Amino acid sequence: MKIKGRKASVVITLDPASVRKARDLGLNISKICQNALDEAIRRMESPESAAKPNSAAGTGKNEPLSRGKSLGRDLNPGPAAYEAAALPS
């Protein structure tokens, strides 16, 4: 591990197809890994807070999310309205 200023440089091994897709989507792999690591550490250090199903993920608050509150870009959008109307029910 190399320490550069305030960040540590580490090597991780990822599936090449996932890396290509992430780059195509403009995702910041380092930030995603940092957030996942921080969440794993938080859960390991405080298992009782991780067991709460209605906690606001990533906000540091244990309060339910209200309806209509935006969490940012939808990474799994459903079909467009015209496509949804054509789907069998």
Image: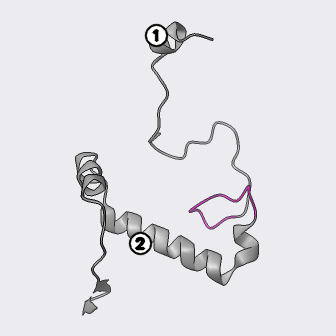
Would you place residue 72 above or below residue 83 in this image?
below
Label 2 – label 1 distance at C-alpha? 38 Å
Q: Is residue 2 left or right of residue 65?
A: left
Q: Is residue 54 magenta?
A: yes
Which residue does the numbered mark 2 point to in the structure image? 34
Q: Is residue 26 left or right of residue 65?
A: left
Identify the residue shown where x is 49% and y is 27%: 78
Label 2: element kind: helix
Specify the segment rendered in magenta: 52-61
Q: Which mark is residue 82?
A: 1
Q: Amino acid at mark 1?
A: Tyr
* Residue 69 percent coordinates (x, y): 62, 42
In-front residue for pair 46/68: 46
Q: Using a 10 Å C-alpha cutoff, classify the residue at mark 2 as few (fewer than 14 neighbours), some (14 to 19) or many (20 or more).
A: few
Would you place residue 78 above or below residue 23 in this image?
above
Label 1: element kind: helix
Q: Is residue 12 magenta?
A: no
In-front residue for pair 15/8: 15
Q: Amino acid at mark 2?
A: Gln
* Residue 63 percent coordinates (x, y): 73, 58
* Residue 30 percent coordinates (x, y): 32, 68
Position of the N terminus, as image quadrant, is bottom left
Mark 2 and mark 1 lie on one chain; the one further toward the N terminus is: 2
Would you place residue 20 above or below residue 15 in this image?
above
Identify the residue shown where x is 69% and y is 49%: 65
* Residue 33 percent coordinates (x, y): 39, 68
